[in-house]
Structures are given as C-alpha cells and as structure tokens.
Amino acid sequence: MSTQFGDKYRRWARVTKATMRITHKPGDAMQVDWAGETIPYFDTVTGEEYKAYLFVTALPCSCYIYTEACGDMKQENWLLCHVHAYEYFGGVARLLVPDNLKTGVITNTRYETRLNESYRELAEYYGTAVVPARVRKPQDKSIVEKSAGFSTTWITAAMRERKFFSLAEVEAAVAERLEIINTMQFQKRPGNRREAYLNEEKEFMLPLPRVPYEPAVWKQATIRNDYLVSDGQNKYSVPFDLIGDQVQIRLTKNTVEVFFKGDHVASHQRLATFQTQPVVKPEHMPEKHRRYLRYNADDFRVWAKNVGNSAETVVDYFLKSGSSQEQGYKNCVTLMKLAEKGGKGKLEFACERMLELSSLPSIRTIAVILKNGKEPERKTTSPADSEKYGITRGAAYFKKDGDRNA
C-alpha cells in the first residue's frame, strides 16, 4: 500500500543520507577549482568592461588557501596558477584533486581517467598524482568548494565597491585580500590558516624543484604541403618528409617543439610578436627548395666562371638583357640543369658555338646544340623551294619587248 511504501522509502532515505567525517592527512592533497563569481575591470579609454576570474586552491588539512585573478580560464593560466600556488605554499602535496574541466581532464569515467597532456606533464614535473573528483560529486573536493565560497565573500564581495581599470590592479587587490584571509583567526579553534599550515603541514609537503615548471600546451596538427606548423600566431617549419602525417606540438612561452610518434623532430625559438614570414630551417627543406633560396646573380656568375669563359659570357648576357637581374634567373637555372645532364664541358662547347652563331644567346639554340652535338644547320632557300610557293618569272621576263626580242 502507499502508506507502507512511504514508510519504507523514508527509512531508506534516512540511511542513505549518512555522511562520514574524513580526517585529512598533512601534505596529502591539494584541491583546485575556479570560483563562480568574477571581478569586473574597465578599459580606461573605451570604458569597456572585462572580467577577472578567480582561481582557488586549498590544502584540506590546514585549510590554507591560495587565490589568483586571471584574465581567462584557458589552459595556460590554469597551469600557471598551479605553479604559483606551489611557490606560495613552498611545497607540493602528494595528490592533486581538480574538477573535471577540459583544461585538466579529458575523460573521467568509472573505467578510465584520461588527463590533458599538459596537465599530466605538470603533475609529473612536480612529482604529484592527479586524482580528479567524480563527475557531479563536489563533495570529493569539499574544502576547495567551501574555500571558493569563502573567497567569493571575503574577496569578490568585499571589493564590489571598488572600480578597477586593469587586470594588474585586480591581481594586486586579490593578493592583499588573500593575506587577510590566511591570517584571520579561526572561529572554532585557536590560530589561523597560516599558523596551522606552518605548524602542522609544511614539513609533510614534497620539496619544490629547483626550477619552476614552464607551462606547456600540447596540440595536434597534420602537416600540409608547406611543411609548417602554427603556434596560433606564427608558423614554423618541420622536416618536409612529414607532409601528410600527424604530429604533436608542444608550446611553451619560449619554445615550439614538434614530436612525431614520440620522437623529437623539430625545435624553434618561439617568436613573441607576429611576423608575416614563417621561421624555416634549411635542413627541413627539400633540396630543390634550398637550391632556389641560394639563387642570386653573384652565385650564377661564380658557377659560370667554373664552367668556362663562354658560359660566363652567356650568363652575363642573361642577367643584363632584362630590366632586372631576376628576369634572367630562369635562363641561368636552365643552363645549370643542362650542365647537370650533359656535363660542364659539353655546355661550354655549346655556349661557344652559340656565340659564334649570334651575339644574342638563346637557351633553345644552346639546348639544340647540346642535343645534336653540333650547331644547328643554317636555313638556305633553294630555287626548288621557291617554286613550291608559285611561278618565279625571273629578271628577263620584266625586260622591255625590244630587249626581249634582241
């Protein structure tokens, strides 16, 4: 009956609401999240409003927290905030407990947990293990949830009357409020967060590495025909034989690294500003592309001098015959290809014969001489050839009648 069902359901509901108090070990975990509220700031010229997002970190044992204002919640800021939090604490917790946001966790199911490559790299660098909270289970990181709400009250709400005109001003104000929070006396126990951390937890934290982690963003790309990859602003070269393959790109503030199936294949110094021309290393280019970049008038003349005097004269003519030297590059390149096929000696012979035939060298004529091994035949017009185009009367036909009769 419905009454009996209701009694059993209420009894079941009471039992399932049972909670367990967990004693947090010192230095065991660090919980991280973004606060829900944002802090507005304005452009001094246009008056446009922007939002600063609040990153919150908490150590469950001592309730020691770290907060930082960021211009966005993208991966680079997410990683940098972790680095700054470790520096602020002066140590690293054994576990790192984030939410399931995509900048940290790709998938988190009962069967597998896949971390973002950049986030996994950061955890390995600091010697900590990432244990994401269960999906839609905020109680798995309850301390940072409470700290985020606490930060919203004591930072965001406390500064609601202030007007900021840059992100730097917001960051400075948040840092000031953070010190107030961590030195505020507990309500139900003696001391404050900082004292609790220094006395109870600091010695159990893992040591920091000597050099702070440099955040790296990983992305995938398929190499196109120009054998270039992009960091979102500028382009950089990779070995041309990777065209059509998929590579992994590791981006840091100062470097661009490319990996193919785990092997490091390219590295570049990352440009800070936009440039129209890509960064290309000669060793990444096909041989014909490298050769093309070396084309210039001086190199053509040096090459021709090594072939012979006649070739040098022909090349000099090609470079000077147009209104610009570049107009003769094509003919010079063709000469070089002819030398590769037939040899420099034969090319010098062909150029010598060409200059004997004409003072205006022609690539076509030089090619014919090389092909036949001799100069092209001169065209002559014979009487038989003339008759093919009609009757030729001759000079006697046009004499006067008297002269013809004579």
Image (cartoon, helix red, strand yellow):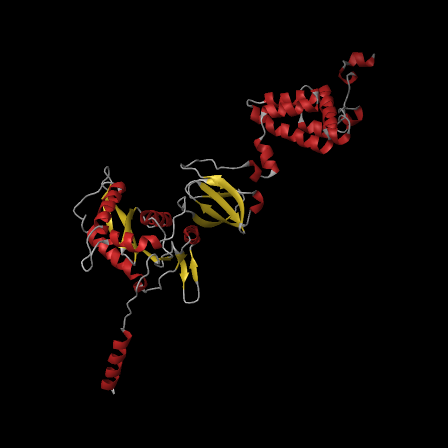
Which residue appears at 23% of the width and 38% of the height? Answer: 44
Occupied quadrant, residue 107: bottom left
Nearer to the camera, 329 or 208: 208
Left or right: 377, with 137 as reference point: right
Residue furthest left as drawn: 161
Residue furthest bottom as drawn: 1
Q: Position of residue 314 (x, y in %)?
A: 66, 22
Left or right: 258, with 31 as reference point: right
Nearer to the camera, 96 or 344: 96
Q: Position of residue 272 (x, y in %)?
A: 40, 37
Look at the image and tell me in which quarter the C terminus lies. top right
Occupied quadrant, residue 288: top right
Q: Position of residue 352 (x, y in %)?
A: 73, 21
Look at the image and tell me whether residue 140 can be seen: yes
Left or right: 277, with 53 as reference point: right
Look at the image and tell me in which quarter the N terminus lies. bottom left
Look at the image and tell me whether residue 389 can be seen: no
Tell me how many marks there are: 0
Nearer to the camera, 157 or 383: 157
